Image: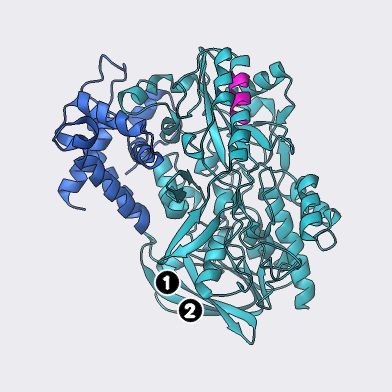
Amino acid sequence: MSRYERRWIVGVVHAIYPSDVTAGVTGFPLGAKEFPMDRFVEDFFRHTSFQARWGLRFAFFLFQILPFLFIGRFRFFHRLDPKDQQRYLECWHYHRFHVIREVTVLFKLVASLGFCGFPEVQERIGYDKPNRQPPL
Amino acid sequence: MTNPTDNPLYNSNQHVRGEFVEKDLYDEADYCIVGSGAAGAACARTLTKEGASVILVEEGPYYSSANYTVNVWKTMKKVCREAGMLAAITPSFSMPILQGTCVGGSTLINSAISWRLPEEAHHVWAKQFGLGEALPYAALENCFSTIEEELHIVSTPDNVAGKNNLLMKKGAQALGIPASPTLRAVHECEGKGLCLQGCPNHRKQSMTITYIPMALQKGARLYSSCRVEKISVEKGASVGVIGHFLSQDRQRKKMKLQVRARKGVILAASAIQTPLLLQRNRLANSSGQVGAHFQAHPGAAMLGFYKEEVRQWEGATQGFQTKPSWEKRYKLESLTLPPELLMIRMPGIGLKTMSYLDSLRHTALWVAAIRSEAQGKIRNFLGIPQVLYVPTPRDMETLRNALKTLADMHFAAGAYAVAPNVLGLPDLLTSPDQTRLLSEQPAQPGQVTMAATHLFGTCRMGVDPKTSVVNPRFECHDVKKLYITDSSVFPTNIGVNPQHTIIAMAMHASHGILDRGS
């Protein structure tokens, strides 16, 4: 995986659990940017099967380059402003075609396995199990 | 307290860890069993108890309790097939399928719910598949009794139930729905809610701490991290297997293992892996039925939001359930999910999902599993395993009814909102009146997020070689001394959690295999 691709994927994870814009919106003080999601993404793709790995990479690639088709913005996803990123995510998530909706469910899975696995996030949620470890 | 998972036998020369093997190996025994989950372990335990020599080959690694962690990703990448990314995928529907790939198989990461085979299911098997005489219910009942005693199958007591389970009880009682605490193979459960990550207190009676050590005690030998690729056949009878040990990250093949099985090979690799292995070997498929008739119990989750703290992660993972109705075709259960998996079920995406993070401790999660009538197939497509499966309209109707009942139960238990997770409905239903939307919605399969853990039917048992893969003695019609004992032989799904039945069937099969071998 090239560093550009990793950056794209991590950018999607950051948009699913955003940090900087959430303070007054969700009340949750942590976001994916506060954690080393690049290391998690690297590890995730190293351990998934050939077909899952390539399927996901292709999905992330399409997602990155198609904002013009869904929200009329001629920019890559990671160059959109947070408001447009959210709008674009929702366009996919509530799309009438199952395949497109499922892509965002997969993204949510990757993002949640990473972000929600960090002990600081679990502490804040109230998931007070002993010996919590980060997903790295 | 001693740690039963780390039974010293796992560190003896009876257990070879494939990750560390440096040369090709050869071994020989009466029977070679492929897969160490519920079916494989039960066969190993039964065969060794009667004096047979057994080699158990498991594709996954031995996951020592020293490595158990509450982190879901760390668990999934070590013990789940395809790191938990296995799924049935078609353009109109997809469904994740969670399977354990480790010593003990899925029994290490399930909730150990134990139901006897419903008599209605046995009746269907007898009537439609002619299995009544060969597979008498009385014989299975003997096996059930043995298992219940050996695996400490008991009802979940209230003191470890936790609020998630107790709220479900309240909801069911309020609506007059027959329900009861779950029967589970758990010895003195402490209600830590960590069944899915491997019970840290070693209370869950997974095969890893029960039947596998019992078999090792009786002389069985275990090869972990070894993928079986070839079934050796001579003069129409199976005589052994050939496999390769896998590297620690499971991505690379290493040295070779060759096993000679004097009396037969037993496949117990699951309803997905067993047909794939047969297909790759072009064996036992003159009927064309290998990989066909794939059935499951697809399930969907319903989250309830409560004013009080529920802290669903405290208490037994799955401690309460409604009585399954054969006619209604569904079963409702409580389920504890860790935050990583729970957040996937939250409505919306991005900011919207994130706004629920602080409410996680106020949610209760219950699931519906349906006795689906859909049949799919398992196949190798250009060398890549594929699971093709789409629920039928009748299945969707069943699921809609089940989800409506779950929503009604949540409101009856005091929820102020429920998240239906059905496309086309509001993210949250906030009054009991709105639950009718669930039954009015003409749901298509892709509109509901589903998952499956119970899999059946891909090497169906039957008396007719033209329509089935194995005969009622669990032996392949086409290949002598090649037996299949996992849930792929079930002619249909059974409407309840299958672990108990899988173990009982494997025990029953082993007695027959022993008779035949002698």
Residue B220: x %, y % from top left: 63, 69
Give the Cα separation between the discs numbered 1 and 2: 9 Å
- Please check whether the numbered discs 1 and 2 fall on a single chain: yes
Figure chain in cyan: B
Residue at (34% x, 22% y) in the render: B352
Disc 1 crowd, CA 10 A, few/some/many (<14, 14-19, 20+): some
- Residue drawn at x 63%, y 15% as measured from the top left: B412
Instruction: Find residue B439 and name its label.
Output: none
Q: Which residue corresponds to the image point at 73% horizontal and 60% vertical from the top-left?
A: B507
- Image check: B514 left or right of B19? right
Q: Is residue A32 visible?
A: no
Mark number, residue B21: 1
Q: Which chain is blue?
A: A
Residue A28's image quarter? top left
- Residue B69 in view in this figure: yes
| Residue B211 image point, x, y percent | 66, 57
- The residue labelled by disc 2 is B25
Q: Residues within 10 Å of mark 2 (few under 14, many from 20)?
A: some
Residue in the picture at 63% in, 63% down:
B459
**In which quarter of the view is residue B189 placed?**
top right
Task: Please give the range of residues in magenta.
Answer: B402-410
Type of amino acid at the residue the image marks with label 1: Val
